[in-house]
Image (cartoon, rainbow, N blue to C red):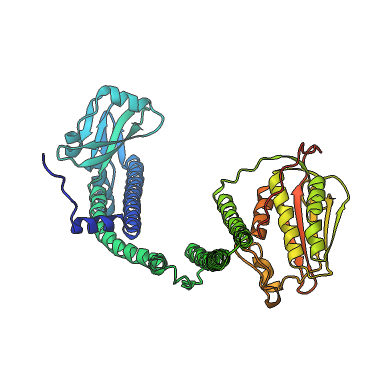
Amino acid sequence: MNAPVKPTAKTSTRFRFVRSLRFRLTAGFLLFFTLMLSGVGILFREMLTSILQDQAEAALEEEWGASKGYLRIEHQRQLWYFDRFDPEESLIVNRIRRVELLTDSSGNVLEVSPIYNSLGIDPLSHIQQVLKATGPTLLIRNDGHGVRYLIRQGSVPDGRSHLYFLAIGRALSDNDRLVSKFTWRYFAFMPLLIVLSGFLGWWLAGRALRPVTELAATAHNITGSNLSVEIPLRNASDELDELIEAFNRMIARLNLSFEQMRQFSTDVSHELRTPLTAIRGQLEVALFTAKTTEQYQDAMVNALQDVEQLTNIVRALLLLSQAESGQLVLQMTPVNLADVIRNMAEQYQIPAEAAQIQLTCDVHENCTVRADRVQMERLISNLLSNAIKYTPEGGRVRIVLDSDRESEAAEPQARLTVEDSGIGIPAAKLPHIFDRFYRVRPSHTNPVQGLGLGLSFVSWIVNAHGGTIDVESKEGAGSKFIVRLPLAATPELAETPAPLALTES
């Protein structure tokens, strides 16, 4: 069995050249240009043929009219009346009689020229048919040498109202030579035009694809540490400029994603290192210094608390991964937000009182939405947790639920508002608070712990339920988060509340 032939580098290079976009654009342009030139040549050839044919018919019609003025038929004899000493009249009559046939109605030939005789005498049936016709008959005949002749046939009367058959003709050889010369010259010159057009098309394709080539070269130079590249716009306001803008925006998004990943890696390393260091310290203390059972138990309790913190971090990262990959399936049921908010507010009364913060709950009406109750609890839990976390002692947190029936939305909505009198968020950082792993860290709030995932989960939950979330905040004056969710078609209440969800912050 013969071994398969592997493509050589030369063959591979040739294949890539043929498959290149520049080659295909040039080939397509050449194919279109060749078809266009061929079509134009054929069209012009037909137009030239038609014009020459019309001119020949017009000239033959003039000769037919002249023949009626010079020809007389008397007693079965034809007589040509013209001044033989007038060169112009002699030329006209001789040209008429050069291709001519004259017969009576019975087909008897009265006069025939040698050229017409070579074309063939018309049969009696054809002669009688022409004599009966009301108009002239035009036809084309070829002689023995392949020369074409345009023939005009009709009837002429004599002095006694007898009809005679007359046919005159003109050679079309000059017309055929002119058409043939045009055809040969045009199609002989066309390959030169195609070659020149090929070079022009190749140059134009290269010039048009230069931004794409630069784009590809830039893409090859992009690495995880080099995402600041940007291709300058051509300022042509065309599709290539749109492509360059889209590419630059993509690079900017990639750069932002890489920065977030780097920040996330730093934050996760710090968050994981802290409980691991504490666990190791507690175990080392128990191993080297503990002497009594109580000391061992205290070390184990402290280590378990740090393990629980570590577990919470890993659980938050797992939930984030599931949300991003679409594995977090929503269990949509009618949920009464009023009940959920009352339960969550009751749960957070104790930590709020411990932080000396006043937590109030204002639920004006029952609002039923079609939602996943667990995710609704997670949403409210994250908002309340953040509000309490970033509100100093003596502050207040207020959660309000009402319906937003006068908004521009097509359907009535439930409006959930969580407002605090905390430290607020700087205006420059407001656009980023819903980004994953992003945390607002003023110097006086460094002790606040968290991964920066809570608001990312809130945003994901709201979007997954077809709602919107807005934030109003001023540094030093508190923040207000407003969540709007579509109301359910029927105000059904959820049957049983689900367990309280874990807060990610």
On the image, which quarter does residue 209 sit in?
A: bottom left
Which percent across, then down, holds residue 342? Answer: 82, 49
Query: Quarter holding the C terminus?
Result: bottom right
Which percent across, then down, holds residue 145? Answer: 15, 40
Would residue 276 be found to the left or right of residue 2 on screen? right
State whether residue 86 appears in this view.
no
- Name the residue rendered at 29%, 43% in the picture: 81
- Name the residue rendered at 34%, 60% in the picture: 22
Would residue 202 be found to the left or right of residue 425 on screen? left
Where is 146 relative to 299, above or below? Answer: above
Front residue of 295 and 154:
295
Front residue of 282 and 106:
282
Front residue of 359 and 65:
359
Which percent across, then down, holds residue 379? Answer: 71, 53
Would residue 65 be found to the left or right of residue 190 on screen? right
Would residue 205 be found to the left or right of residue 313 on screen? left
Where is 396 relative to 369, above or below? Answer: below
